[in-house]
Amino acid sequence: MVSNLAKEHGVEAKSRTFSPWSHVVSLVHAQLTHAIGLNDVCDSLQMHREALSTIRGATPPSRNTLSHANKTRCSGMAEALYWKMMNHLMTLSPAFGRGKTRRGYLRRFKVMIHAIDSTTIQLVANCMDWAKHRRRKAAAKCHLRLNLQNFLPNCVIVDTARHHDVTQASALCAKLQEGEIAVFDKGYLDFGLLANLDHRGVRWVTRAKDNMAYRVVRTLDTTDNARVSPSAYRFYPDALRRVVALVEVDGQNREMVFLTNHMGWSAWSVAELYRCRWDIEVFFKEIKQTLQLADFLGHSANAVQWQVWIGLLVHLLLRYLAFLHSWQHSFTRLFTVLRSAWWHRWYLNDLLDSYGTAKPPGRICAAPESAFLPGFA
């Protein structure tokens, strides 16, 4: 798979002693070990040269070789490798692509639900001019459309942070099918996009901006929940539905206004659909806390793209391992277990199947009269 993609993207022609396969393995190693620099990656791989060669003949690079590969080899190969690997894993295990049935109130939705959002990846401003979006700040943005059934991305766009989220909204929603549901924050609110989705039969839920001008043409009563206010319509040029609900944020009730193009859902369903958008924030937290997306191995845009896409590839492979072995612990713990066993010869099936948690300590039974309280007789 890697060699074929290398030929398609012209990477094979630029490779001499450092093969595309060795390049991918080196970046996977950097993700699993949280390498903080090129020397960290190269020195570790040089020390484990014999073990590395057992991974289909991978070879360790020198510092300059790895730096040059990250800068010049097309990062589109890493992107294509991610999507091809995802399709391959879903073909091997169709249940992995279907995901789990949602729990709670939203389990009655049988259609695919997508959450759309972005996360900012901080970069170093004084050596990454291409990523500057403030005078002293530089960052990249990862725009993502997440399938909330299987918790896997359907569309990923890695761009600089200088552009507003709404500029990538059309690309993220391009392949949504009729009947599917898209949930996104008001950062992606564009009435032209909303009209396009409505004409394609895509259902959506978003938040309204505070300064939005609207006119109430009819009031609906679809729920008796005390936390939901009456609904309203607005034209764009078609009718929109406006739902006002009290949402608990940090222990306090906060009024939020939602918009949707579906008139048949109860107002509580609209609020619940938007609440499930939080799952994409959990996804971003998961990859940022486990993958190496803080210290980058190069300053060019191409090097950053390589590291982000290989990081997503590592996340995909770990999620597939968790699925195969019905992993009951957290994703962070799976990552730390595999990182600890990275250079050891473990039979992975036995390791993950037998891995357990220490039992909680037993309770101490004591009588109240046996307690000693200073100052009391």
Image: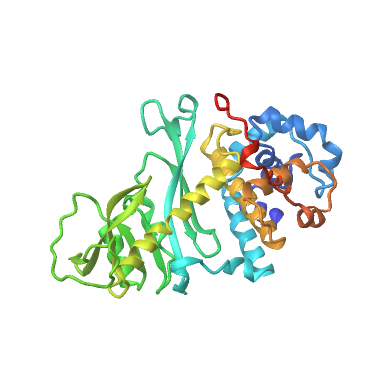
**Can residue 278 be spotted in the picture?**
yes
Q: Position of residue 195 (x, y in %)?
A: 27, 66
Compared to 163, does 135 lie above or below? above
Q: Position of residue 215 (x, y in %)?
A: 13, 62
Residue in the foreground of this view, choosing between 192 and 109: 109
> Based on the displayed image, in which of its 4 quarters is residue 181 positioned?
bottom left
Q: Position of residue 297 (x, y in %)?
A: 61, 33
Query: What residue is at 76 percent from the left and 32 percent from the top?
Result: 44
Q: Split into 4 quadrants, where in the image is the N terminus?
A: bottom right
**Can residue 10 be spotted in the picture?**
no
Residue in the foreground of this view, choosing between 272 and 128: 272
Q: In the displayed structure, does residue 319 sit left or right of residue 25?
A: left
Q: How many marks?
A: 0
Compared to 41, does 366 lie above or below? below
> Based on the displayed image, in which of its 4 quarters is residue 114 positioned?
bottom left
Q: In the displayed structure, does residue 142 sit left or right of residue 162?
A: right
Query: What residue is at 65 percent from the left and 42 percent from the top?
Result: 367
Query: What residue is at 77 percent from the left and 35 percent from the top?
Result: 45
Q: Split into 4 quadrants, where in the image is the C terminus?
A: top right
Colour treatment of the image: rainbow
